[in-house]
Amino acid sequence: MSIALKTVADLVSRLRELHRRTQETPLFNPVFQLSLDLSRAIEAGELSLDECEVLLGELECESIKSRAGRLRTLVAPVTPEANDDALKGDSADFAAFRERWENPALHAVFTAHPTFLLPPAQTDAVAQAASSDAPISDAPCAASTERRAITLGYEHSEAMSAIARAQDARDRIVGTVLGEAAERWSEDWRALQPMPFRFASWVGYDMDGRTDIKWYHSIGFRLAEKAQRLERYAASLKAIDSGHGLAGNLSRAADEARARAEDFASDLTEPEALSAAANRLTADHPDKLTSLAPIIEALEEEAEDAARDRAIALKTLAAAMRADGLGMGWIHFRVNASQLHNAIRRRIDPDNTLDLASQGAIAVLRDILAKVEPLRSNFGALAIESSTAIRQFLAMAQILEHVDSDAPIRMLVAECEQPATVLAALYFAKLFGIADKVDVSPLFETENALEHGGRFLDALLAEDAFREYARARGRICIQTGFSDAGRFVGQVPASLAIERLQGRLADAMAANGLTDTAALIFNTHGEGMGRGAHPSSYEDRLAWPLSEWARRRFVRAGIRLEPEASFQGGDGYLFFSTPELALATLTRIAELRPSETDPDVPADPFYRRTDLSLDFYRAVRTHQREHLESRTYARAVTAFGLGLLNSTGSRVSRRQGDLSRDREMSLRQIRAIPHNAILQQLGYPVNILAGIGSAAEGNYEAVAELLESSARGRQIVRLVRASNALASIKTMAAYGELFNSAYWASRPYRGTEPHLAAACEMLAEYLTKDDRNGVFRRLVSRLRVDGLKLHRLLDMLPDENPLDDREDTRRIIGALQALRLALLQHMFLRAVAIPPFSRANDVDRNDVLEMVFTLRIDEALKELRRAYPTSFPRPDDFDLDATSDYPDGAGEGYSQIGRDYIDPIERAHALNLRIGIAIANLFGAHG
């Protein structure tokens, strides 16, 4: 019986019909059955790959519209007029108004995390669709799916474009704030110096895990940012007054910075080239600017006597200059703790005998910090330095001296687990004379760092040298990470552990007399649920990484809180991809005031009933750790390598290692973003859902009551429900069936597909030795048991944020997964059916098959085309006088093999990667 499978409506209808059969047979898998229906149609010639692409186009359309709708819902309203009105009239007096607007509501950091998933045309289409209140039509679906190579230069350009739109939105907010102040406090308003947001970026400065960024690239990026910002300042001033005297100064300074940026964009590995570029940068020049302080002062003085509208415009420009300095924003350098350890050992422990975690090491560091004398440095010292960490400090010193002497620089230290690491960073900052401009910020992300972070902070803040430094800087900076933390302990336990760490920082600051110093907490969460982005609302998005409980700890201690959050890569930049979205995003943040909270609200039961909440946290964490340490989980997650994912960034997604050892691949070889992205693609976000139900076992009523009565508990439930609404254990099980030898042996058993008998037999025989089917079955069984407990718990709790289109979305995801599974079966069948002979007999056929089964398709295609070439040199390519009758055949090319086997594998894999984008869109983000 032929089944209609030509449209999405056909697929959804068939999937709905198949779901009803699960009542008859509990183990029946509707997703895999639909994939078999599609596979039979493909292999019978009833459904071509062209028709599969048409089906995919329809499904992509739904996913793009879903992505646009989700984005708009988060930041709505999106019209500029509505957002102008949203921030007016809620401060009773000028002092309160000034307090609100002169302190940043948020520091926003634009990072280059590899989440550049959408092709550029689709990015624009999603953004435009989300930028108005009009119903979202099918117009975005016409956008090109053509991808482009993602280089560091591309990432930097995209980051700067996003920041530019954020700057424009901030200028509009500042203008609105100044206008309201002028209306309400006509005598005082000119004293107002708004600073609602600061922006920063580490694109081009992050050295953690990268060897492709040279130090002079970072200098070049910084100079290019300086030129771009000066050009924007000049344009803003010319818009106020085309003949303004300072506009020419800014334009000439921009030209000078642009010329120096071009110098450092070239290859400076040779001493002669570096010397010339460095000398031009360090030389005195009439157009060289290293501080905006005189210009800001002049603009403020002019605004004192200017007419109202001109004064607002001048003060808006001055506010932008105060916020950004001579760049598109502040910059963050980033190194790994081990790089700092290697650098400091050269100074204090050349024989490598000192344990840097010991009190002896701390004593040595105290001594050298007390005695350190600043050293001068130049670009020659930078060029010859071999230590990555020291090179970073030398680069910062050159930037502060020759590019921008006002804007501070952040030094982020990844995998920082001991106070000695921070003291080492402080030593190098002092050694090169930049401690007054550099904020050293340890990153807490590993399980060990989160577990022992409180003691780390107690010890660090007890150090006299650090306290002196913190008071001089006016802030203490820490960074908390949700990617690796969510991967290794689960997203819910990670967020609760980070929250506790933030509270410990407040306690340590109060205990060490640092309440007059600000606490800058940089929460580096991503855009996906598995990496710390709460999907339910913008309020939840801001409060998930920095909860009301944590904020109250600082407010009650009298500590000024400076929250900082990341907008990561292409997914994060979507919030700033049009002027309307940028304004809406910043307006929502300003409305929600993440740096503030009410210190007098009653205690949340989640923190009062620690007999329940602490046990809940520990049980979920233990459950997640058991998955992480299980070879079953690791093997299932890495079953296809990274072959289900598109390349989404310039940084490699896989840590260095032997690429031939996929069978034993460790989860630590895969970075956090692709790990989470693979879970999305396999259909079940383990790092969000696993363990929540099991943690309530034996105490369901009490845990449910706690979660329902607690604001934090309800927030956890909203995250879990949002993830569970998209999750499908049967989908994960379906992927395991691809490696089921019995399935392939049985498929043509009753003569239904005799043309596949040989290929199915080869697959069946090959897979008898493969472990992946058993691995998936074991993992799915564990998840199923835990899932039953989760559903039992959720049934006891109200659904505060039900998804109206939940079932429709699940059906679309199911159809996408079934289509992909059918395409993977097509690839497997084509791979084993390739004739077992080749012109190049040095290719191991089993190696090529394993490449296909782990979706290392580019490698497989390369080997197959080398084994079965389609073109050769011909005698008539040569200009010879003598004749030849040989070769007498049509050639030895394998064009038919290429057409019938190799090309379809390539085409099917291209569709597989597009399906990956569509699935990520429906989950709301990549990873």
Image: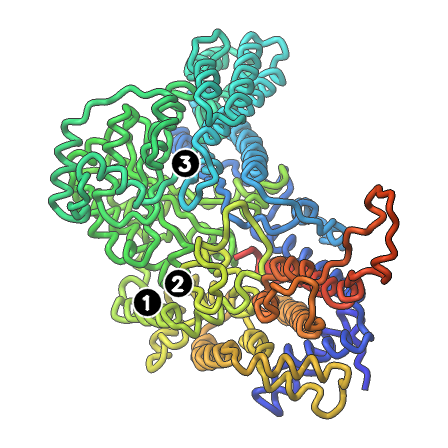
Can residue 309 be seen here? yes
The kind of residue on which mark 1 rests is Tyr
Q: Nearer the viewer, residue 328 or 339?
A: 339
Position in image of residue 359 (x %, y %): 12, 46
For residue 617, which numbered disc appears in the image? 1
Question: Residue at point 42% right, 46% down?
Answer: 209
Q: Is residue 880 left or right of residue 781?
A: right
The quarter of the picture where residue 259 lies is top right
Q: Are the residues tagged 3 and 1 within 8 Å (C-beta)?
A: no
Q: Are the residues tagged 2 and 1 within 8 Å (C-beta)?
A: yes
Indicate which disc, 3 or 1, sits on the residue closer to the N terminus.
3
Q: Which residue is mark 2?
A: 492
Position in image of residue 257 (x %, y %): 52, 18
Secondary structure beneath label 2: helix
Q: Is residue 595 left or right of residue 266?
A: left
Position in image of residue 365 (x %, y %): 16, 37
The kind of residue on which mark 3 rests is His
Q: Are the residues tagged 3 and 2 within 8 Å (C-beta)?
A: no
Q: Which residue is mark 3?
A: 332
The kind of residue on which mark 2 rests is Val
Q: Is residue 887 left or right of residue 300?
A: right
Question: Residue at point 64% right, 68% down?
Answer: 813
Question: Residue at point 76% right, 76% down?
Answer: 43
Q: Quadrant of the N terminus?
A: bottom right
For residue 192, which numbered disc appears in the image? none
Please state which of the two labelled residues, at mark 3 or mark 1, is closer to the viewer.
3
How far apart marks 3 and 1 lie (CA) works out to 33 Å
